[in-house]
Image (tube, grey):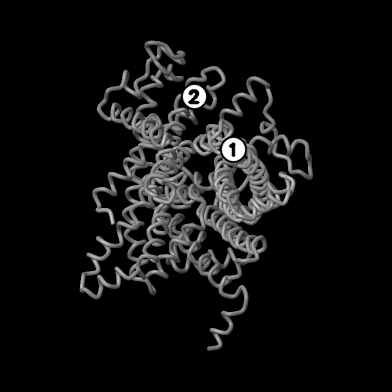
Amino acid sequence: MNFRRIMKYPGVSRTLSVLTTLFGISVFVFLVLRVIPGDSITGAFGIETGALSPQQIAELRVYYGIDQSLFMQYISWMQSFLSGKFGFAYSTGVSVATLTKSSLPVTIELAIIGTVLGVILGIAIGMFSAKKPGSTRDFAGQLFGLLALAIPGFVLSTGIVTIMANKFHYFPNGYEYMTPWENPWMNFQQMMFPGLVLGIAVAAPIMRTTRSALLETVDKDFVRTAHGKGVPNNTVQFRHILRNSLIPIVTMTGIQFGYLLGGAVIVEKIFALPGMGRQILDAIMKREYATVQSSIMIFAIMFVLINVATDIIYRKIDPRIKK
Amino acid sequence: MRNKEEKTKGAFHYYLQSTSGIVGAVLVLVMIIVAIFSILGITPYDPVEQHIENILQGPSTHFWFGTDEFGRDVFSRTLEGMRRSLTVSISAVTFAAILGVSFGILAGYVGKWFDQLVTRVSDVFFAFPAILLALAIVASLGNDWYDTALAIGVVYTPIFIRVARGPVLTVKEMDYIKISRVLGFSSFRILRKHIFPNVFAPIVVQIALSLSWAILTESGLSFLGLGTQPPTPSLGLMVAEAQPLAAFAWWTLVFPSLFITIVVVGLNLVGDGLRDALDPARRSS
C-alpha cells in the first residue's frame, strides 16, 4: 500500500529499475570474468609462477582473496567498488580508481568530440540529402552514410595514421598524452583525428535518421501552412522541419554516444591515447580481473546514465511525452 | 485476403524492384562465392605458405593482391579471411536469432513474470557497448573461431529478443488469436501459425543488419588480437599486421579493408531492400 504510493513519486520507479539493471550488470560482469582461464597469480607473476611452491601459491591466493567462495568474492569486490576504490590491480597494487581518474577524462573528451562532430556532420548531410530526395546530392549523401557505416573505425584510423605519418611526417600521438589543461594545442592535435574517426562513425546513423525524419515532416500540413503564409524558407527548414524531427535524432545520438565508449577501445589503441578503452584492453591482456571488472562496470554505469539523460532530454524537447 | 504463396512471391517481386537491394545482393553473393572458393581450397596459393623470395611484392599477374612481409599471397589470405569472417558471423547470428526469437516470442506470448525476467536480462545486455561485452566474453573463453562466434552471438541475442517480442505483444490481443484459443488450438499451433508469421519480416531484416555488425565486431576483435591468432589469416588481423607496412606496401592494407567494406555495404543494402520489400507501407515509395 505504502509501497505503491512511494512508487508514484517522480523518478522513484525509474531509479529502482536503473539500480536493478546495474545490479544485474555487476553480477554478469563478475561471472563472465571469473571464467577466465589462468588466474590472476599467473597474471601477476608470469612465467615465474612455476618457481613458486604450492604453499606460496596458496598464501598468494589468500592474499588476493581468490581462495574464497564466488559469493564472498563478489561481496568483497562490491565493497571495494562502492567504497570508491574500485579494487586494485594485482600486479602493481595501484587502485583502479587511480587508474580511472586519469583515463576516464580522456575517453569522455574523445566521446564528446566524436558526438559533437558526428551530430554536426550527420544533421548537415542528412539535411543536404533530404532537400531533394532521389537527386544526385541525395545519392551522394546516402553513399556517405553507407560508407561511414561500413568502413570499420580501425581501417579509417590505420589509413589516417599511415598517410599523416608518411606523407606529412606528422604524428602527434608519438608524444606523451597532454590534457587540455597542460597543453591545449597539443591535446587538440592528439584528439583531432581519433575524434574525427569516431565522429564519422556516429554521423552515419544520425544522417540516416535525420534524412528519414525530415522527409516525414516535410509532408506535414503545418509545413505547407508555414510556406503558404510566407515564412522565409530557411526559417521553415530550421524552426518547423528540423525542430519537429529532433526526437529521433536525439534518441539516435544518445544510443551512439554509448557506442562511442565501445568504439573508443579501438581508436585509443591505434592513436595511443591513455583512456578507459586501453585500460580495459591492457587489463584483459594481463588477466587483471579487478581492473577489467571495475572498468567495464564504470562504462556500463555511464551507458545507463546516458540512456536516462536521453530520456529526460526528449521529454524536454517534446512536451507531448509525459509518461 | 491474399494467400500465402502470393504474399511471398510479392515480396520477392518487390525486392527485385529496389536497386539497392539488387546491388547489395550481388555484392554479398560475390563475397560468399569467394569464401566458398577458399573452403574448397581453390586459392592460387596456400594462405599461410611463405615465399621468402617474394617478400612485399606489389600486385602482379602472379600475386593479384601482392604479397606480405613473409611473402604470403595477400589474395589467398583475403579469401581465407573472408571465409572466417563469414563463418563466425553466420554462426553468431544464427545462434542469436534462434535464441533471441524463441525467447522474444515466448516472453511476449506468456507475459507476466517470464516476460519481466527476459526483458530485465536483455536490458542488462543492452547496457554494454557490444564490442566491450564481446571483448570481455572472448577474454574469458579463448581465441578459437567458435569462442568469437559465441561471444558475438550472446551480444546480439537481446536485439532479436526485442525485435521478436514487440509484434507478439500487439498481435496477442487481436481477436483472431483469442478465437484460436477459444477454438482450443494448442499454444504451439497458435505460436507457429498465427504469431510467428507476424514476427518474420522484422527478423529477416534484422538478420541482414546483424550479419553486417557481426562482421565488423569480428574483424574488430581480431584487429585487437583477441580473435583469430597468427599465422591464420582473418581480415581484421591482416589490417593490424599491415599497419607498419602500409606506407610502402599499400596493398597489404587496402585489399582486406576493401573486402570488409564491400561485404558490410552489401549486407546493409540487402537489409534496406528487404525492409522495403517486406513492409507493405513502404512499397509505394
Nearer to me, A100 or A148: A148
Chain bearing tag 2 is: B
Chain bearing tag 1 is: A
Residue A69 figure quarter: bottom left
Which secondary structure lies at badge 2?
helix
* Quarter of the figure that contains the C terminus of chain A: bottom right
Which secondary structure lies at badge 1?
loop
Q: Is residue A239 visible?
A: yes
Tell me if residue B104 comes above or below residue B226 in the rendering. Answer: below
Most extreme residue toward the front, as rendered?
A: A228
Q: Which residue is mark 2?
A: B254
- Where in the figure is residue A221, as x and y percent of width and height? 61, 55
Q: Which residue does the image show at 60% across and 29% down from the upper left? A: A160
The Cα–Cα distance between marks 2 and 1, rounded to whole angstroms, is 34 Å
Residue A254 figure quarter: bottom right
Q: Which residue does the image show at 25% across and 66% down from the upper left? A: B190
Q: Which residue is mark 1?
A: A132
Q: Would residue B217 appear left or right of B35 to someone viewing this image?
A: right
- Between tags 2 and 1, which lies in front? 1
Nearer to me, A196 or B272: B272
Q: Which residue does the image show at 45% across and 35% down from the upper left? A: B265
Identity, as a three-letter code, of the amino acid under mark 1 = Lys
Nearer to me, B212 or B43: B212
Identity, as a three-letter code, of the amino acid under mark 2 = Val
